[in-house]
């Protein structure tokens, strides 16, 4: 497996975007760039966007958040969605209120999801006997706003797209947008079965005209990353759709899809087959 071409760094790395916003890059192992988190510091409260995969990853995020906030605890842990790599570090922020969409809340209440996440945590070295399932404390249906003092975070639920619970976050004063896994920067995306809402989410992000996009995975980017993600998904949908319309079965489409411009992206070898099957479902096949 080749190192990630953008940032082959094994540990969580803190990157200051502005005096109020610091991004924690997820660790990189081989081709896999794990989930990012972000510290957002207001005059009255501190929020962390996304809880990463493990307490070991979130421990330096909490320490830096408390330092930047003058010693006060993190008030809010804000979710972009409920996938395990964005929520299982929640236990680090034991005094924070978890804010997420109603879809995130429903996902985390599902007994099958709890069983799966407990298994993931155990495989990552956690104690099965002390596993605590992350839950959403403050849920919203469509929109949310959090006043941190001096500026706000605004959330919009756009799932299902990449996941059932995709949520975008936006800070107008800083002109920073958090895409969650609507954007994989520098890696092949994890595609499931809904492209229509994924494009809706990308449109929403672009309409904000952000100066910085914080992707769910990968380094910080400008708004051009939104066009790049759209082009990849459109190319995948066009090629798979063309094969299916020509009479190919889904299995044949998996074997024949080329997507030449994107096959060399990190994670493409692992994710391309599932992406083709997901697009086939999205196209009604």
Image (cartoon, rainbow, N blue to C red):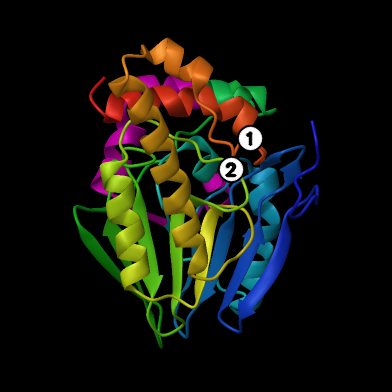
CA neighbours of label 2 inside 10 A, class few (<14), some (14 to 19), many (20+): few
Q: Eyeballing the image, is 93 above or below 265?
A: below
The reply, left or right, for residue 208 in relation to residue 217 is left
Q: Secondary structure at mark 2?
A: loop
Instruction: From the top left corner, tell me how far across and down residue 148 is, in percent.
Output: 40, 78
Whether 263 is drawn above or below 115: the answer is below
Residue in the foreground of this view, choosing between 232 and 220: 232
**Local SS, label 1:** loop
Q: Tell me where residue 241 appears, x and y as whole percent.
A: 33, 29
Q: For the point 28% across and 60% down, which residue is it?
A: 156
* Residue in view at x 50 percent, y 67 percent: 224
Q: Return the residue at label 1.
A: 267
Residues packed near mark 1 inside 10 Å, few (<14), some (14 to 19) or many (20 plus): many
- Position of 114 compared to 23: left or right? left
Choose mark 1 or mark 2, whichever is in front. 2
Viewer-closest of 201 and 157: 201
**Cα distance between the residues tagged 1 and 2:** 14 Å
State the residue at coordinates (40%, 22%): 277
Residue 48 bears which disc, if any?
none
11 with respect to 45 (left or right): right
The part of the chain drawn in magenta is 89-117
The residue at which mark 2 appears reads as: 261
User: In the displayed structure, would residue 41 be above or below residue 166?
Assistant: below
In the figure, residue 113 lies in which quadrant? top left
Residue 279 seen anywhere in this rendered image of the structure: no
Looking at the image, is mark 1 or mark 2 earlier in the sequence? 2
Q: Quadrant of residue 187?
A: top right
Residue 251 percent location from the top left of the image: 43, 11
């Amino acid at each position: 497996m080749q190192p990630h071409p953008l940032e082959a760094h094994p540990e969580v790395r803190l990157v200051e975007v502005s005096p109020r916003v610091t991004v924690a890059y997820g660790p990189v192992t081989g081709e896999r760039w794990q989930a990012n988190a972000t510290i957002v510091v207001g005059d009255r409260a501190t929020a962390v966007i996304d809880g990463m995969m493990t307490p070991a990853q979130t421990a330096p995020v909490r320490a830096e958040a408390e330092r930047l906030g003058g010693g006060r605890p993190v008030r809010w842990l804000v979710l972009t969605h409920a996938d395990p790599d964005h929520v299982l570090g929640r236990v680090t922020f034991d005094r924070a209120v978890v804010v997420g969409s109603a879809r995130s809340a429903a996902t985390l209440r599902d007994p099958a999801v709890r069983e799966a996440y407990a298994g993931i945590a155990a495989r990552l070295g956690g104690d099965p006997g002390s596993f605590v399932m992350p839950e959403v404390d403050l849920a919203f249906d469509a929109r949310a706003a959090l006043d941190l003092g001096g500026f706000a975070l605004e959330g919009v639920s756009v799932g299902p797209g990449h996941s059932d619970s995709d949520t975008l976050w936006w800070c107008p004063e800083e002109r920073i947008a958090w895409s969650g896994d609507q954007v994989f920067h520098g890696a092949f995306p994890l595609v499931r079965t809904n492209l229509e809402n994924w494009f809706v989410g990308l449109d929403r992000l672009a309409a904000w005209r952000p100066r910085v996009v914080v992707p769910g995975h990968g380094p910080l980017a400008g708004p051009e990353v939104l066009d790049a993600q759209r082009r990849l998904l459109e190319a995948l949908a066009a090629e798979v759709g063309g094969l299916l319309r020509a009479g190919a079965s889904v299995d044949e489409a998996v074997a024949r899809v080329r997507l030449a411009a994107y096959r060399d992206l990190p994670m493409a070898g692992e994710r391309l087959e599932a992406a083709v099957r997901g697009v086939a479902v999205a196209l009604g096949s």
